[in-house]
Image (tube, rainbow, N blue to C red):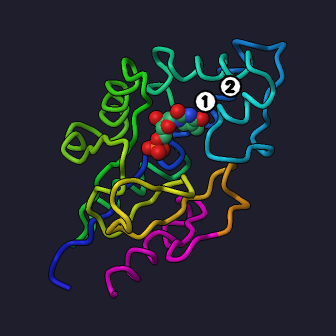
Amino acid sequence: SSRNLRVLLDMDGVLADFEGQFLKRFREKYPHDPFVPLDERSGFYVTKQYYALGQDIGTKAFGIYEEKGFFLDLQPIDGAIEAAREMAEMEGVDVYICTSPIKKYTHCVVEKYQWLDKHLGKEWMERMILTRDKTVINGDLLIDDKPNITGGMNPPKWQHVLFTSYHNRDVVLQDGQIRLDGWLPHSRWRDILEQKRQE
Ligand code: TMP
């Protein structure tokens, strides 16, 4: 078709390793508390799983990603930066970053911009969409690790590409969803985009 394909990329769990950083910081800060190893993660919210270990553990978990520096220091997911760059350079493809800040926005919001600047550069500020409701954003594909994305627009315009993460490995795909098992090899995400373009 004549118009560009709009691809929305989630940050946490897709470009940036929220889970790995969370666990690392939690263990550093609370070495004597119980924790959830990555291969035992289930459910989107880390905090929910930590609250199940005790009210105090849940509160501590919350505090981890509210701290200054948490979002800025996230490591890129393997292959993510290269994939984002390559996708943005593709003819006929427009890439946006679509991310939900935490409610305690003080560090998170500015650090999300700083992270993008640090890893992808100033031009990417133009692509940034911060929203707590991704369903109202117009796009052809949303690549996101959250299994059930709901909001005010039902159904959303985009097709959901579920990006595999520890917490969603065993999740059964819903109607219309497709799975992307990581950024490598690049042929995987390229195939998904090509397929969508041909619809
Ligand atoms: P996302 O849907 O754009 O990936 O955003 C996820 C946001 O949710 C991110 O800012 C971190 C936050 N979050 C929590 O508040 N609690 C959690 O347990 C997890 C995993 C994420």
The residue that mark 2 highlights is 24
Q: Are the residues tagged 2 and 1 within 8 Å (C-beta)?
A: yes
- Residue depicted at 58% across the width and 71% down the height: 174
Q: Is residue 157 above or below residue 67?
A: below
Crowding at dot 2, Cα within 10 Å, few <14 / some 14-19 / many 20+, comes out as: few
At mark 1, the secondary structure is helix
- Name the side, left or right, on which 160 lies relative to 134: right
User: Disc 2 marks which amino acid?
Assistant: Lys
At mark 2, the secondary structure is helix
Name the residue at the left extreme: 2
Q: Give percent across and percent down for residue 48.
A: 67, 35
Residue range of the region highlighted in magenta in the rendering: 173-199
Crowding at dot 1, Cα within 10 Å, few <14 / some 14-19 / many 20+, comes out as: some
User: Disc 1 marks which amino acid?
Assistant: Gln
* Nearer-the-camera pick, 120 or 68: 68
Q: Quadrant of the N terminus?
A: bottom left
- Residue depicted at 35% across the width and 48% down the height: 98
The residue that mark 1 highlights is 21
- Residue depicted at 62% across the width and 37% down the height: 19
